[in-house]
Image: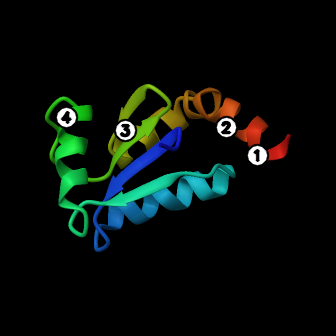
Amino acid sequence: MSEIVLYTKDYCPYCKQAKALLRRKGVAFTEYEVIENPEKWDEMIARSNGARTVPQIFIGDTHVGGATDMFALDKQGGLDPLLAPYLKRLTA
């Protein structure tokens, strides 16, 4: 499993914004579309301690939460340190 994982729905605008931010940051991620993969829906709920909204974002062992949570973390300067180990792997 990828170290950065997003659980999404294809029609979700927040999912699209979250993916766009991660792409701008230059990190690779794995996306699981939960409508097409219902087993991933159950996995997402279990990993996120019951969250049922998408996206649900995981960076390594850290459950970031949803898109709004990730945007807030980025604004506070906390997202880049979480992503730093994954940037090094892409450029090494």
Q: Residues within 10 Å of mark 4 (few under 14, many from 20)?
A: few
Instruction: Report which residue position mark 2 lands on.
Output: 86
Q: Secondary structure at mark 4?
A: helix
User: Residue 69: which numbered mark, if any?
Assistant: 3
Residues 43 and 75: in front is: 43
From the image, state whether disc 4 or disc 2 is nearer to you: 4
Instruction: Report which residue position mark 4 lands on.
Output: 46
> Please, what is the three-letter code of the amino acid marked with disc 2?
Tyr
Q: Secondary structure at mark 1?
A: helix
The correct choice, above or below, for 91 with respect to 17 in the image is above
> Please, what is the three-letter code of the amino acid marked with disc 3?
Asp
The correct choice, above or below, for 56 with respect to 48 in the image is below
The residue located at (43%, 26%) in the rendering is: 62
Q: Earlier in the sequence, mark 1 or mark 3?
A: 3
Instruction: Report which residue position mark 1 lands on.
Output: 90
What colour scheme was applied to this rendering of the protein?
rainbow
From the image, state whether disc 4 or disc 3 is nearer to you: 4
Q: Earlier in the sequence, mark 4 or mark 3?
A: 4
Residues 4 and 43: in front is: 43
The residue located at (44%, 25%) in the rendering is: 61
Q: CA distance from mark 1 to mark 3?
A: 25 Å
Q: CA distance from mark 1 to mark 2?
A: 7 Å
Q: Residues within 10 Å of mark 1 (few under 14, many from 20)?
A: few
Residue 20 drawn at (x, y percent): 53, 61
Please state if 84 lies on the left or on the right of 58 as rendered. right
Q: Earlier in the sequence, mark 1 or mark 4?
A: 4
Residue 89 drawn at (x, y percent): 75, 39
Please state if 5 lies on the left or on the right of 12 as rendered. right
> Please, what is the three-letter code of the amino acid marked with disc 1?
Leu
> Please, what is the three-letter code of the amino acid marked with disc 4?
Ala
Q: Are marks 4 and 2 in contact (CB under 8 Å)?
A: no
